[in-house]
Amino acid sequence: MTQTEKLPDCQVGDRFIVSRIRLEESLCHRLQALGIVPGCQIHILYKKRSGTMVIRCRGARYALGAGAAKGIFGGKAV
């Protein structure tokens, strides 16, 4: 894993390992329920200019709004 960065800094096709999530509590719990927790690997499938992203995590696809994506920190998997 490289240095800490925000999820929106990644490009389509990148694999990202979550190290921490800094969002309001209710959104944090929602992401945890989906399996997006520190240590999980995310694959970036699609990214819009607005910051909205489609990701794959633990075999499932999810759409994340720009606000949620900005609160997910980690680094690119090597």
Image: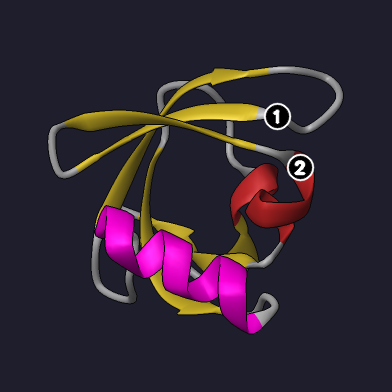
Residue 78 in sight here? no
**Residue most toward the left?**
59
Residue at point 33% right, 45% down?
Answer: 42
Determine which quarter of the picture holds residue 36: bottom left
Q: Residues within 10 Å of mark 1 (few under 14, many from 20)?
A: some
**Marks 2 and 1 close (CB-CB < 8 Å):** yes
Residue at point 73% right, 17% down?
Answer: 48
Residue at point 76% right, 42% down?
Answer: 66
Measure the C-alpha gap from mark 2 to mark 1. 5 Å
Q: Is residue 30 left or right of residue 3?
A: left
Q: Position of residue 38 (x, y in %)?
A: 33, 76
Q: How many marks?
A: 2
Between disc 2 and disc 1, whose residue precedes? 1
Tag of residue 36: none
Q: Quadrant of the N terminus?
A: bottom left
**Residue marked by disc 1:** 52
**Chief secondary structure of the magenta span?**
helix
Q: Secondary structure at mark 2?
A: helix
Please provide the residue range marked out in magenta. 25-35
* Membership of 58 in magenta stretch: no
Q: Is residue 8 left or right of residue 67?
A: left
* Membership of 33 in magenta stretch: yes
Q: Position of residue 30 (x, y in %)?
A: 45, 62
**Residue most toward the front?**
26
Q: Position of residue 69 (x, y in %)?
A: 65, 51
- As shown in the figure, which amino acid type bears the numbered disc 1? Thr
Residue 54 in sight here? yes
**Residue marked by disc 2:** 66
- As shown in the figure, which amino acid type bears the numbered disc 2? Ala
Q: Is residue 77 left or right of residue 5?
A: left
